[in-house]
Image (spheres, rainbow, N blue to C red):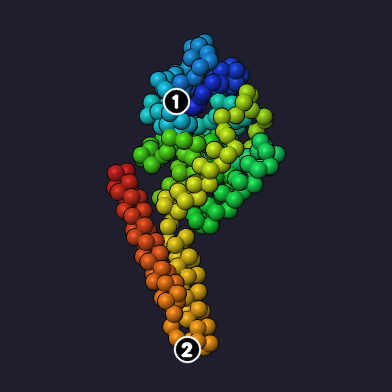
Amino acid sequence: MNKKISVIIPARNEAESLKVILPEIARIKNIFEIIVVDDASEDNTAAICADNNVKIVSHVYHKGNGASIKSGARKATGEYLVFMDADGQHEPKNITALLNELDNGYDMVIGARERDSHASLPRYIANLIYNKFASYMSGHEIMDLTSGFRAVKSTYFKKFLYLLPNGFSYPTTITMAFFRSGFSIKYIPIDCPPRIGSSHIRLIKDGIKFFLIIFRLTSLYSPLKIFAPISLMLFITGIGYYGYTYIYAERFTNMSILFLLTSVIIFMIGLLAEQITFLIYSESQKQDD
């Protein structure tokens, strides 16, 4: 491997785990730079980074995981970027396996968590639903939609920075953007040990946010895949209701008209959204060329 590699680690109050993982990463061959993005931590994260001689990007206030990813990517100079969490769940020993697949021709390689690696059953079930939905939307098998452990070619990743949200849903956005643009993605199964310290994810608050990921997927990838089935269902309902009222009441009811008009409106909204997404990715491709 003759590429410059930048490892980017978003961190918020993760000093204890950084003590463990930073020396391990530094021992990996071909790592050009390690960048820790300190998202307004209140512990001694900055001191730990200084002790390990790594680059640090500091936020003056808490901006979010996605914002930290963008800050780190802007500062990175490597041809390959590796993103991993600072909580100790992503083991540095797996970095080489991700990078090897980039050398084999893939544009992004993602560490997919095994069943036992999820923190709880509800999170596993939620992630499974996201994976199935995203697989339907993209037409590709997605093993772990929300995994933050990934290696990617820098030039491809940076062209989508403007799409990335500031919160925890950045992995979802970048994965679907890559599929939408025709880039190649590979998943590698990994085991994740228990995190060091307490999680920053709140089940109810972030559960609602992750539920909204589904709607974000719709707008990012292929809106018509959602709007068309809903439109068809309403159209069939309208025709069926018309048939029922015509046979038994010999009339065409307002409810039938409502169903049919709604189906047409929803289909047109989906078609318009589809054209908007096409223009977004077309413009992104022009900038890349």
Q: Position of residue 24 (x, y in %)?
A: 59, 21
Res. 4 visible in picture: no
Q: Closer to us: mark 1 or mark 2?
A: 2
> Which residue of the protein is positioned furthest toward the right in this rendering?
116
Whole-number angstrom distance, CA of label 1 to CA of label 2? 65 Å
What residue appears at the point 40 percent right and 64 percent down from the top-left corner? 266
**Mark linked to residue 250:** 2
What residue appears at the point 43 percent right and 28 percent down from the top-left corner? 63
The image shows residue 47, relative to residue 12, as above or below, that is: above
Closest to the observer, 66 or 235: 235
Q: Position of residue 137 (x, y in %)?
A: 50, 56
Can you identify the residue that label 1 sits on? 62
Name the quadrant of the C terminus: top left
Task: Judge the density around disc 2: few (<14), some (14-19), many (≥20) Cα neighbours within 10 Å.
Answer: few
The image shows residue 175, relative to residue 81, as above or below, that is: below
The image shows residue 145, relative to residue 17, as above or below, that is: below
What residue appears at the point 48 percent right and 17 percent down from the top-left corner? 54
- Left-right relation of 45 to 158: right
Closest to the observer, 137 or 103: 137
**Mark linked to residue 9:** none
Res. 41 visible in picture: yes
Mark found first going from the N terminus, 1 or 2: 1
**SS label for mark 1:** loop
What residue appears at the point 47 percent right and 60 percent down from the top-left corner? 226
Closest to the observer, 101 or 286: 286
Q: Position of residue 79 (x, y in %)?
A: 42, 32
Q: Amino acid at mark 2?
A: Glu
Q: Position of residue 180 (x, y in %)?
A: 43, 51
